Image (spheres, helix red, strand yellow):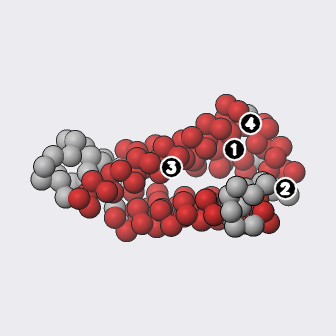
Amino acid sequence: MTALPSQSTSQTDLAALILRLALGGLFLAHAGLKIFVFTPAGTAGFFQSIGLPGPLAYLIIAVEVLGGLALIAGYRTRIVSLALIPVLLGAIVTVHFAAGFFFTNENGGWEYPAFWIIALVVQSLLGDGAASLGRRG
């Protein structure tokens, strides 16, 4: 892992770091919501209520936790960013699309998860950035 950003760190490296930390934090926050607020069993019940297999909820929670941690650490950032996109596409298709575009709509529209997908695509293009496990010094 490289040292924290220095004056020689490019703006692109710094941008990738900031985006990576934000995306990783968001995935951990969403996993935390499923774990600590809704509970894993409650999340599984919700998945079943919308026609998905209940055990899929546990997989999604694990993917969000591991993906969030990998992004924060800068571990295989390009691959992890792309691998997290299906989670958000699933959220759009199964829950948010029917609520319309705006996330302020009842049941949340698909605006926010779509923007999150775009941010993940940008992260995959930027790569690891500064202060990452994947960075070669």
**Residue at (75%, 58%) from the top-left corner?**
105
Q: Residues within 10 Å of mark 1 (few under 14, many from 20)?
A: some
Q: Is residue 15 visible?
A: yes
Mark 2 to mark 4 CA distance (whole Å): 15 Å
Q: Is residue 70 visible?
A: no
Q: Which residue is mark 4?
A: 38
- Drawn side of residue 47 relative to residue 87, left or right: right
| Label 4 residue SS | loop
**Marked residue nearer the N-terminal end (4 or 3):** 4
**Marked residue nearer the N-terminal end (4 or 1):** 4
| Label 1 residue SS | helix
Which mark lies nearer to you, 4 or 3? 4
Horizontal and vertical percent position of residue 122 = 42, 66
Mark 4 to mark 3 CA distance (whole Å): 20 Å
- Drawn side of residue 97 relative to residue 32, left or right: right
Choose between 12 and 131: the one closer to the eye. 12
Q: Amino acid at mark 2?
A: Ile
Q: Quick check: 111 above or below 1? A: below
Quadrant of the rendering where the N terminus is positioned: top left
Q: Quick check: 18 above or below 81? A: above
Q: Which residue is mark 3?
A: 67
Horizontal and vertical percent position of residue 15 = 31, 57
Q: Residues within 10 Å of mark 4 (few under 14, many from 20)?
A: some
Looking at this view, name the residue that lies furthest to the left.
Answer: 8
Q: Which residue is mark 1?
A: 58
Q: Amino acid at mark 3?
A: Gly
- Drawn side of residue 26 relative to residue 98, left or right: left
- CB atoms of marks 4 and 1 within 8 Å: no
Q: Residues within 10 Å of mark 3 (few under 14, many from 20)?
A: many
Q: Which mark is residue 50?
A: 2
